[in-house]
Amino acid sequence: MSEILDIAAVVERLLKVDNILILCHKNPDGDTIGSAGALFWALKALGKNVMVLCSDEIPARYNYMNIAVFDDSYSPEYIVAVDVAGMQLFGDVTVSWAENCHLCIDHHPSNSRYADAMLLDGNAAATAEVMYDLLVAMGVQITPIIANCLYTGIATDTGCFKFANVTPRTHTTTAKLMEAGAEYVMLNELLFESKSRRRLAIERIALESLEYHFDDTCALVVLTKEQIAETGADGTDLEGITSMPRTIEGVKVGITMRQQPTGSYKVSVRTSTGVNACAICARLGGGGHHRASGCEIIGGLQNAKAALLTEVERELKNPTPIEEQE
Ligand SMILES: [Mn+2]
């Protein structure tokens, strides 16, 4: 169980240490990379040795953050995880470092509290929102590159300010980032107005597998490991697919099943208002947010699908209440 810290206590701890390793979650998204990038540049500005590590390669689209990836050139004395809700989300490369994680900075209410200490703000739309408050409290100047990193985290976790997790605070923080030089026009085009050819190829394959369940209120797509390999789709391409089934008219639960190299299925569940995605995934050993959650199911496709659809049906028939403040 983690010790729960406030921002002032986290500032005190970070200022005391010199060699820091920042960990991201596997299949990295804009929030874990952007939060890591912002903390990286802030700690560098304070004269510290700092590097970032992720079990998967950082997607090339985030190259503008210019983050140094950990190369064993020093022994980290302090390990910070950003936007990582549970141990199972670290992946092979980072999991041994994560076992000694000193601090986790996160916004997932479902965080399993694996780190020694935690800065958790379940009301924040993105970890990057929490990170902005932390960096200001540290007295770090929000440079254009830090602003770009934080803008990336907030914009990607809110679907470019479209999701229900957006609050007035989200816009207030974003306004500060714009004042600090965030290149929002360039970033919006890069992050939301362009798709790779690989992404289009994997979208076409996903659409061919589309099936409907429960009076067309649930849409499901499946991608095999061979199809993923064949298109060369990377983590970002695949992450983009997950929002697709839910956008179909009348669909309340959109599911994407991606076969992993090990054969297990990584499942992403996206729901419309009032359907609790986290409740569905929690019963399968996963978690996340009310409208966007995930889990991993081991076993053949038919068994995995059956287990998943059983939980979807249960949730559609007996909805788990959604707590307002989360
Ligand atoms: Mn996040």
Image: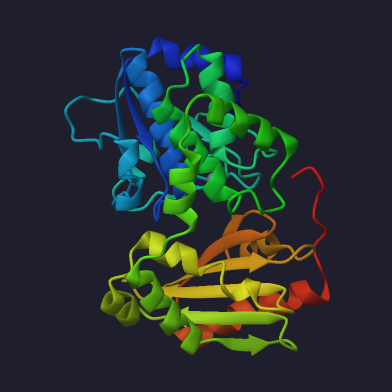
Residue 294 located left or right of residue 261: right
Q: Nearer the viewer, residue 145 or 296?
A: 145
Residue at 18% x, 32% y is: 72
Q: Quadrant of ligand 1?
A: top right
- In the image, residue 106 sits, relative to residue 253, either above or below, namely above
Q: Is residue 101 visible?
A: no
- In the image, residue 205 sits, relative to residue 73, either above or below, namely below
Q: Position of residue 294 (x, y in %)?
A: 55, 62
Q: Nearer the viewer, residue 158 or 114?
A: 158
- In the image, residue 9 sits, relative to residue 313, either above or below, namely above
Residue at 58% x, 74% y is: 255
Q: Position of residue 172 (x, y in %)?
A: 67, 30
- In the image, residue 132 sits, relative to residue 280, either above or below, namely above
Q: Nearer the viewer, residue 252 or 10?
A: 252
Quadrant (top left/top right/bottom left/bottom right) for the N terminus? top right
Q: Quadrant of residue 94?
A: top left
Quadrant (top left/top right/bottom left/bottom right) for the C terminus? top right
Residue at 64% x, 72% y is: 247
Q: Give the number of marks.
A: 0
Residue 201 located left or right of residue 137: left
Q: Residue furthest front?
A: 185
Q: Is residue 185 visible?
A: yes
Residue at 33% x, 64% y is: 234
Q: Position of residue 204 (x, y in %)?
A: 43, 82
Q: Position of residue 175 (x, y in %)?
A: 62, 30
- The colour style of the image is rainbow
